[in-house]
Amino acid sequence: MKRIYEAPAYGPQGACWWANTVPPDDWPALPGDRSTEVAVIGGGYTGLSAALHLAQEGTGVTVLEAEHAGYGASGRNGGFCCLGGSKATSGQLRRQYGPEGLMAWRATEKAAIETVAGLIADHGIEADTHSEGETLIAHSARAFGKLKAGLDEIESEYGVTPRLLEMEEMAAEGLGGPFFGAVTIPVGFALNPRKYHAGLARAARAAGATLHGHSPVTALRRDGKWMLSTPHGTLTADRVILATNGYSSEDVPDWLRARYLPVQSSVIVTEPLTEAQRAAQGWTSYQMAYDTRVLLHYFRLMPDNRFLFGMRGGLTATPRAQASISRKIRGDFAEMFPGWRDVRLSHEWAGLVCIMASLTPFAGPVPDQPGLFAGMGYHGNGVAMASHTGMLLADLVRDRAPRALLPEAMSTPPRRFPLDRHRRAMLAPAYAAASLLDL
């Protein structure tokens, strides 16, 4: 396997709080040579959703996960089931895909949230859901001005009415801090990502899907049928879904080379906060929130009163870089929530999200590779969009029209990044420019 980060980036980067909240579910390794109708590479939300929807239709499906259940981003994210999945602006989407393409993408963002809500309801998944939509918090007076100016755009593109909070109203809403106002968009909810992942896995197995862990696909080739090599055996399949996202390899298959860019994201979680501690900071809301910076922070008070705080990760996965980003996230947390400066942190971890050169996800057939499909590139908002993409792929892999709208912004095959295997060198100047914009 060829990957572009140092090995620790793909390893368990710190103790993840979510792992404490579910019983261990160690899927067995592929036990020798096997065959299946559809093979899915990757056992995250995309792969499990695809497997579940395929199995429900009676299709034989086998998932191959390189590590243990919940190992990657699907088990280590912030738990925001919200609008997103793309980093492209409305203007960029309109220029690229036209007004109809923009609205098709916006409708898909909302539909993805509904997909998750439906999966949770249909399969009785206890995922600790909370938060009524998401709240976007202005980090500066100028940013709040932009928020106010964008209210009509939110309403016209998403068909919902956002709620504006002036700076002086935030404390009464339990959103205390050095902030300048906020907008709440009444779409989406927060959840426990590992419980949601475990629930999808249970539902997929109950429907007839086979799930294997500790089975990294080291080679993928086509000889009449697809042959997926693992350390313990070869899986033969009629069709294959690539669902590896930021944990992809440059050569499984070669088509993936330079078509995705993994980016590190970091998270800290506090010990449960007492009522007095919450009151001292003035943050008592259970709303999921993020700020208006380009290099944004995302945060929320969880049902057990721990506070989760996340931000972008380091440029490398070396010990020195990891120590630096650890200092950075702790410093940013203390600056934004000074009342909790001395609160003990119980967990800190990092993981990989995935961005694309187009700044939009991809879901569809891989060009010139009959029977090969891919879903990836959720730009740090994969809880909803990955789950939705898996559902779309389950239809595409059976040569059916997708049961939900598949916008051009998602169906266009991704182009390659410049610099090939050195492409993450582009992150340093991009982060530096973003930092200047965030002042």
Image: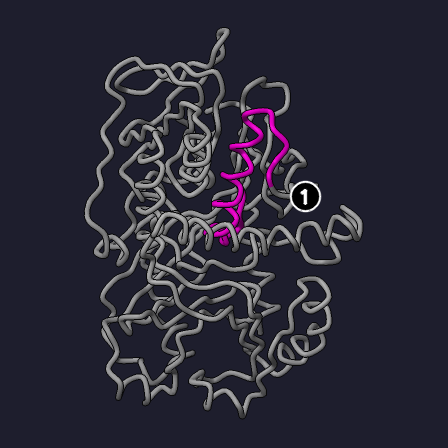
Residue found at the very far top of the displayed protein: 224
Q: Secondary structure at mark 1?
A: loop
Q: Nearer the viewer, residue 309 or 19?
A: 19
Residue 168 rendering spot, x and y as whole percentages: 54, 92
Assess whether residue 33 is covered by the magenta stretch.
no
Q: Is residue 414 left or right of residue 225?
A: right
Count of number-bearing discs:
1
From what the image shows, is residue 213 above or below residue 324?
A: above
- Percent from the top left, x then y, of residue 346? 22, 66
Q: Is residue 85 above or below residue 275?
A: above
Q: Which percent across, then down, holds residue 341? A: 31, 80
Query: Which corner quadrant holds the N terminus?
Result: top left
Is 381 in the magenta?
yes
Residue occupying image coordinates x 37% and y 22%: 218
Crowdedness near tag 1: few (<14), some (14–19) or many (≥20) residues, C-alpha within 10 Å: many
Name the quadrant containing residue 299: bottom left
Residue shown at 58% from the left, 19% from the top: 369
Q: Whole-percent x and y of residue 159? A: 68, 65
The amino acid pointed to by label 1 is Pro
Relative vertical location of residue 184 with respect to residue 214 in this rendering, above or below: below
186 shown above or below 45: below
Query: Nearest the camera: 329 or 83?
Result: 83
31 with respect to 151 (left or right)? left
In percent of the image, x 46 and y 14: which residue is there? 226
Q: Which residue is mark 1?
A: 407
Q: The magenta stretch spans which residues?
A: 377-403
- Residue for point 60% across, 24% down: 399
Type of colouring: one colour
Residue nearer the viewer, 359 or 114: 114
Q: Quadrant of the C terminus?
A: bottom right
Q: Quadrant of residue 418?
A: top right
